[in-house]
Image (cartoon, grey):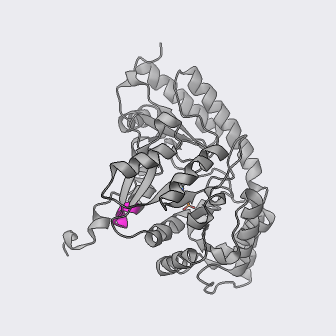
Amino acid sequence: MEINQLNPDIVSVAPSALRVFDHEISADPDIVKLTLGEPDFNVPEHIKQAAIASINADQSHYPYYWGIQELRDAASTYYREKFGYQYTADQIVCTVGATEGLSATFKTLFQPGDGVLIPMPAYPVYKAMALVNHLKPIMIDTTANGCVLKPQQVTDAIKANPDVTIRGVVITDPSNPTGVVYSEDQLAALVPVLRDNKIWVISDEIYGELTYGVQHYSLSRWLPDQTIIINGLSKSHAMTGWRIGFAFGPTGVIDQIAKAHQFQVTTPTSIVQYAAVEALTHGQNDAAAMRKVYEKRCDYLKQELTKLGVTYVEPQGAFYIFMKIPEQCQLDSFAFARQLAKDYHVGLMPGAPFGDPQALRISYASSNENLHAAVDALTKELTKLGVLA
Ligand SMILES: Cc1ncc(COP(=O)(O)O)c(C=O)c1O
């Protein structure tokens, strides 16, 4: 079989650079990894017990493709109380993690050739999803504006791409990789330009419960008819491997997303859905303890990076710090990260896949001991490169 007979939209997309780099450095048995966005907490005990009870109750049959009614009811209440989402159970699809919700949404909202705005730095999966759906990703650099998209940048992108119908924008709030959280005013400022130009918002709010001293707002509050929210339990309840997420959207559109979802996966695993009901009905405070720990770690890293004279995007949420590699190093993000891994057995994520080849992303979803190791390695590397005296 010839590879050139396969779908070129798939063949031409590289595998996730984040996973590839993580795999590369994992060959070192001594590596301390602060690479992937993977909570280092265990799943709360009450959720584990609910999963076990579900197995014992033989809840092993095909659930309805939208997800079981109890879970959609629970998600409706939980997210209304947390963030003021206004969705009834029949406007919510239970997905296989946030990722599958994103995939079904990209597939449904757009037609081949449509443009999708992606504010950078960004989680690289969005660009890949745009490409595999034969869309045109239009990357907008937001670094000059504190990594927040400005309305003028939307207008400029429309003008700069007269041959493309721009039909979507992805807002990640709180952000991976920067930890930036949009304020109420910053979101409200985007509303007129998005409304006037009929631009769909894919609002990835997977880190919504992890904010430090600021509140999380959802663009759906202003644009309910043209927003699809992606959320889930991977980060809030440390359930990454359980693969459970949600897509929220207006009636009519969410029904179509539900079909795209059905043809991809049918529905998430039945046992996980029953356990997720427990998470949403009795786990309202599960994220609070984790949030406290993350916040402390974030403060520690900010303090240590500042001592080293390293600059970073000011984080207010998620569990990442996006730091600049000092210019004097004269190394790009992959070269620096590889050197750090080789010399000191510490893995940080190169910034290039997120759109900044002069940055590194540190995930602080990792133990204090690992964070100390990272600071120590950075100190030694910067000294070796002559940046520190
Ligand atoms: C911004 C963002 N969206 C989505 C995901 C994927 O979430 P899930 O594991 O629920 O598919 C991640 C995971 O790191 C992420 O950082």
Image position of 222 with respect to 141: above or below: below
Residue at image location 66% in from the left, 37% down from the top: 297
Residue at image location 63% in from the left, 78% down from the top: 67
Residue 6 visible at all = yes
For the residue pair 223 and 263, the one nearer the viewer reads as 223
Q: Residue 153 lies in magenta, yes or no?
A: no
Give left or right: position of 11 versus 67.
Answer: left
Q: Total label count?
A: 0
Q: Where is residue 55 in the image (x, y as percent from the top left)?
A: 70, 79
Q: Where is residue 295 in the image (x, y as percent from the top left)?
A: 69, 39
Q: Where is residue 366 in the image (x, y as percent from the top left)?
A: 61, 44
For the residue pair 51 and 95, the one nearer the viewer reads as 95
Looking at the image, in which quadrant does ligand 1 appear? bottom right
Q: Position of residue 132 (x, y in %)?
A: 36, 65
Most distant residue in the top direction: 389
| Residue bounds of the magenta highlight | 130-135
Residue at image location 78% in from the left, 65% down from the top: 46
Quarter holding the N terminus is bottom left
For the residue pair 219 and 106, the one nearer the viewer reads as 219
Image position of 62 with respect to 237: above or below: below
Image position of 267 with respect to 377: above or below: below
Residue at image location 51% in from the left, 25% down from the top: 310
Give left or right: position of 184 versus 330.
Answer: right
For the residue pair 267 and 119, the one nearer the viewer reads as 119
Residue 345 visible at all = no
Give left or right: position of 179 versus 77.
Answer: left
